[in-house]
Amino acid sequence: MKIGREFNFDASHFLPNYEGNCERVHGHTYRLIVEVEGELKENGMVMDFNELKDIVNAVVMKRLDHSNLNEIFENPTAENIAGWIFKELERRIPVCSVKLYEGVGKWVLIER
């Protein structure tokens, strides 16, 4: 069974070695969907939604929200950001997918 939760954060970045609008500093509102997979526990839950929120806030949101992503990533593409989020979360929870929207209508999906 899978459960999920959505998050939003704002951040700025530019893409080095890129020709076009994204070579200049700009910002996005990112939408993040995290899914966790597992068996139902005795309490009837795969994972408590509040526990999931607390972990994502501590691991991802605290680091990325209102940040300059170039200070965190060498090349802050949506693909690299989503990959980092997935790796950081899979150390702590049974994450099965991360979907990261960069603005409206553009997204990256990583699934296990």
Image (tube, helix red, strand yellow):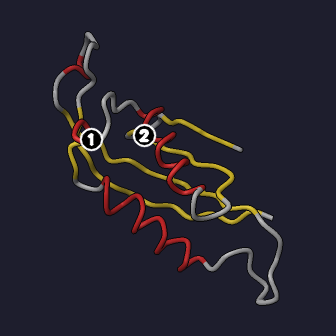
Residue at x 54% of width, y 54% of height? 33
Query: Which disc is residue 5 wearing?
Result: none
Instruction: First in sequence, mark 2 or 1: give its number.
Output: 1
Residue 22 on image: x %, y %: 26, 22
Q: Quadrant of residue 41?
A: bottom right
Identified by mark 2, the residue type is Ile
Seen as rendered, the residue at the extreme top is 19
Q: Are marks 2 and 1 in contact (CB under 8 Å)?
A: yes
Crowding near the residue tagged with mark 2, few <14, some 14–19, many ≥20 C-alpha atoms within 10 Å? some
Q: Quadrant of the N terminus?
A: bottom right
Residue 45 on image: x %, y %: 74, 80
Q: Quadrant of residue 3?
A: bottom right
How many numbered marks appear? 2
Residue 82 is left or right of residue 66, and the answer is right
Query: Which disc is residue 81 wearing?
Result: 2
Residue 107 on image: x %, y %: 50, 36
The residue tagged 1 is 69
